Image (tube, helix red, strand yellow):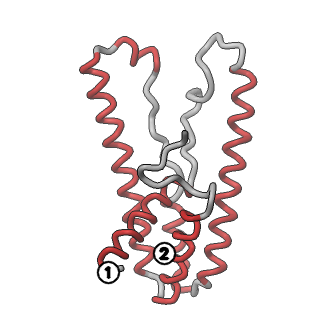
Amino acid sequence: MKPAYKHCVAAAALALLGLSAGAQTPPPGAVGPGPGSMMQGQQRPMMQEHMARMQQRAAQRQARLKQILQLTPAQEGAWNAWVASRQPATLQRPDPAEFARLTTPERIDRMRALRATRAAEMDRRGEATKTFYAALAPAQQKAFDALQLERRSRPGGGHRGFGHHRG
């Protein structure tokens, strides 16, 4: 592989890691079916349980990564900033009732704005990862790269790559 291609692959893997490292916690009240649903009372505890498991797995992955990287005291600040950047942003979900009142062109505009917000969040996480990566020694960078690729290539692990759809 050419070095420039390796960097692009590594950057893409790290950007996608941002999607999988932290679960996006929906704002309060946005979880579960709408008002009047009989399942609402059952959905909320299940969703909270699921989110707690995801956060626990993310913490375990971070602890494993930190152990493998063997960070120096001088790198702790960069680590803490990177871990903080991994916390899910509170992205506002569209209100279904409001969304239903919009015209098709208005819905398209709303979805474009939402997509731009999500892209900005991914960019923020990507830049935070690049900053942390720059603080690592070459051997640590190699370990970081290997762990991210390992996670992506594991069957059933991580997010599916582009062009891989569930069928």
Q: Where is residue 104 in the image (x, y as percent from the top left)?
A: 28, 17
Q: Relative to 108, does residue 100 appear above or below in the rendering?
A: above
Q: Which residue is drawn at 69% across and 29% down?
A: 44
SS under mark 1: loop
Q: Quadrant of the C terminus?
A: top right
Q: Relative to 119, does residue 136 appear above or below in the rendering?
A: below
* In-front residue for pair 21/5: 5
Q: Relative to 40, does residue 62 appear above or below in the rendering?
A: below
Q: Position of residue 107 (x, y in %)?
A: 31, 22
Q: Which residue is drawn at 48% across and 82% down?
A: 141
Residue 13 falls in which quadrant of the image?
A: bottom left
Q: Is residue 49 left or right of residue 68?
A: right
Cα separation, mark 1 vs mark 2, equals: 29 Å
* In-front residue for pair 40/146: 146
For marks 1 and 2, the one nearer the N-term is 1
Q: Position of residue 74 (x, y in %)?
A: 52, 86
Q: Is residue 35 left or right of residue 149?
A: right
Residue at the extreme front of the image, as rendered = 167
Q: Mark 1 points at which residue?
A: 2
**In this view, the mark in front (1 or 2):** 1
Mark 2: amino acid: Ala
Q: Mark 2 points at which residue?
A: 78
**Rendered image: mark on residue 83:** none
Residue at the extreme left of the image, as rendered = 105
Q: Is residue 30 left or right of residue 59?
A: left
Mark 1: amino acid: Lys
Q: Which residue is drawn at 62% across and 76% down?
A: 66
Q: In which quarter of the image is the N terminus?
A: bottom left
